[in-house]
Amino acid sequence: MYTRSNVYQSYNVKLDNVLAFTEKISFKVGDSIRLKIHSKKECFGQLLKIEDSIRVIIDSIEINEFSQSNIYNPIVGFAWRTNLKICTDSLISGYYLFRIYEKQKPFIQHHHPIIITPNTPPSISIVASTNTWQCYNDFGGISNYEDNINPTYFQRIISLFPSLKPITYCPNQRPYSFMVNAENKFNSSFIDEKNTGLINELDTFGINDLPIISYDSISLPNQHIFGEQLLINFLEKNNFEYGVYSDFDFAFDAEIYKSDLIIFHMHSEYWSQEMIGKLESYCANGGHVVFASGNNIYREVEFYEKGLKVYDEFDGYLTRSLTGTAYTETTYPINSSYKVNLPKHWVFKGCNLNNGDTICINGSGWETDKMGHGSSKYKVLATGLNKIGPAQMVINEDTNGGWIFNASSMTFTQSIQNDETTKQLLFNLINNSINKYSDSINVNLKQ
């Protein structure tokens, strides 16, 4: 029988042998990474950095047995003690992973993503989709998508009367459920052939011979932290200097205004009002923005001390006026390439394209955004070849010299792996906003 007095009451959670999380998602260079670790046995810890590969930065950190409380609250998360601090004085900005594993059984392990932000903003700032990570995180039994705690009858009543639904809290004081025992993620490809779901038909347009991938069948680490690795690999291999920020940092760190280019990528879905205000102000002052992402600015969140509150979807007009397109579920989950609409635009410089050519293999898919009411300022650069609801690659160039480019698809960065036009396109966007890279771009393209 359901006996909890309210949906926000604390309850017990079964803990794995090794778990870890940080008190916040990002730390500035020079801060101490404060880790809260649960370990039933003696363990080793490692700090890893995601670059063009995953590199060990700090190895063989001794971690004693230390059991933390299993009492979980849906608003505040876990009240765990900090039992490890890592100095960041010698680190540079980027994506990091803390890995903990048992000494005697290394396969019993856990990984936790960490963002290290720069002391001074670089020319290129990457904003990780950390709000989306947390909204998908169902550790403790509840996320914005899953509810394994409240009884079925309660969930059915809420589905019939949505106005009665309590606010969904996504506390950041907990491990990530999709990073538990993620030992096989480092060496796996972005698309795991074993995870192709029920859809196995081929793209009838003949653009490529890869099977269509079901979004829901792709593991969550590859949708989030390891999906974001693809753009980082590209930047690292071409020696671009960049810094990484969380969504929270973008909302509240004024220093990011000084960046020449800000890139949102993979799955930038959950935005706060502060983030929207920052984007509008940055663009009004001639900023350059790339949305290498789909499902952009789709749902509103509010930051609170321990995490996020999730609210309703944004009005599509607001999203289209900000980014040129807005998400709809049509075409989900079929991947396709794009067909070029404006081959002579500077975004495609050096691509040797003609009208109707195809680019960005598999780049239009999973969750795609489309034009509509509010998109009038945007030009369509290319359109996905999806049978229904293709992504529309758009750009708005302001008279103040700033611009917003939007690929409108979650799989856009996936095409970096096997499509040269995607790489050239990204080079052009970077070069247009940061002239100092023009020479190195030409050298890398020749290679």
Image: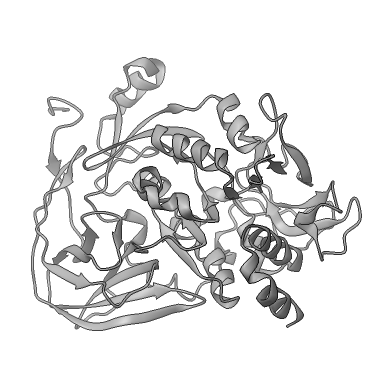
Q: Is residue 445 left or right of residue 292?
A: right
- Residue 105 image position (x, y, % from top left): 23, 80
Residue located 45% across and 39% down the image: 278
Q: Could you tell me which residue is drawn at 13 percent across and 40 percent down?
A: 11
Query: Which quadrant of the figure contains the C terminus?
Result: bottom right
- The image shows residue 249 at horizontal and vertical percentages of 36, 50
Residue 76 relative to residue 165: left or right:
left
Of residue 229 and residue 399, the one placed in the foreground of this image is: 399
Instruction: Say which quadrant the N terminus sits in.
Output: top left
Residue 126 appears in view = yes
Locate residue 267 relative to residue 246 in the image: left or right: right
Give the total of numbered labels: 0
> Looking at the image, is 446 positioned above or below residue 435?
below
- Between 341 and 194, the one lying in front of the other is 341
Which image quarter: residue 160? top left
Left or right of 199 in this view: 187? left
Q: Position of residue 398 (x, y in %)?
A: 68, 40
Along the viewing direction, whichever of 184 and 411 lies nearer the viewer: 411
Q: Position of residue 212 (x, y in %)?
A: 68, 54
Q: Nearer the viewer, residue 145 or 170?
A: 170
> Which residue is pictured at 63% across the width and 57% down the height?
433
For residue 391, say whether it is visible.
Answer: no
What colouring style does the render use?
one colour
